[in-house]
Image (cartoon, rainbow, N blue to C red):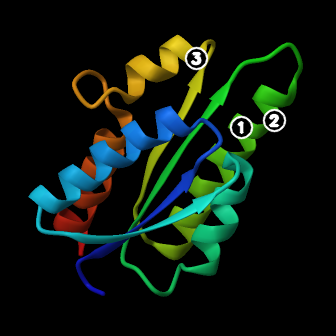
Amino acid sequence: MKNKILIVASNYYEEVMKNLISGSTNFLSESGFDYDVINTTGCFEIPFLIKKNINNYPGFIALGCVIRGETYHFEIISNECARKIMDLSVNSNKPIGFGILTCDTFDQAILRSDPLKKNKGKEAASACVNLLKENF
């Protein structure tokens, strides 16, 4: 699986996720990388699935979306996901493209996931691929 990347995607916001996955998979295909996609219900589960598969792939892409609500939940999920994904990357010495959107509104998430605009899925795939090409 030298050129195969695992995309772990939270499908909580289905439209946003379709856009992020599209941006990632299109970039990976154009770059000569194969990929597998695992879906999960929320962003909090993404680090677990990456850890479970850490020995099976040279790189990963984490895709999800957390939208601010009226409680502290947004900060907990956003901060802990980012922290654990960084820990996994550093401890495993494997790149993990970070494509988890943290937005104030659903409209912001749509804009940041739109394949024709600021698609963060493509950016996360690019980060992962560039690290693999430069460092391995």
Q: Position of residue 5 (x, y in %)?
A: 34, 70
> In whole angstroms, how far apart are the C-alphas of marks 1 and 3?
19 Å
Question: Looking at the picture, does residue 123 appear above or below residue 26?
Answer: above
**Residue at image coords 45%, 72%:** 93
Disc number lying in front (1 or 3):
3
Q: Earlier in the sequence, mark 3 or mark 2?
A: 2
Q: From the viewer's perspective, is 73 left or right of 3?
A: right
Tell me the CA gap for discs 3 and 2: 19 Å
Residue 121, relative to residue 74: is it above or below?
A: below
- Residue under label 3: 106
Q: At which x and y percent is residue 12?
A: 65, 41
At 24% across and 59% down in the image, what residue appears? 129
Q: Quadrant of residue 20?
A: top left
Q: Mark 1 points at which residue?
A: 79
Residue 76: image tag: 2
Three-letter amino acid code at disc 2?
Ile
Quadrant containing the N terminus is bottom left
Amino acid carrying label 1: it is Asn
Q: Considering the numbered disc 2 on the image, is that residue within a helix, a strand or a loop? A: helix
How busy is the neighbourhood of tag 3: few (under 14 within 10 Å), some, or many (20 plus)? some
Callouts 2 and 1 close, C-beta under 8 Å: yes
Q: Residue at position x 85%, y 29% from top?
A: 73
Q: Looking at numbered disc 3 in the image, what kind of residue is underneath it?
A: Phe
Which residue lies most toward the right here? 71
Question: Helix or strand or loop: what does disc 3 sit on?
Answer: helix
**Which x, y percent locates residue 10?**
60, 49
Q: Residues within 10 Å of mark 2 (few under 14, many from 20)?
A: few
Residue 49 is situated, as x and y percent measured from the top left of the image, at: 63, 69
Q: In which quarter of the image is the C terminus?
A: bottom left
Labelled disc at residue 8:
none
Do residues under tags 3 and 2 come within 8 Å of each other at their CB atoms? no
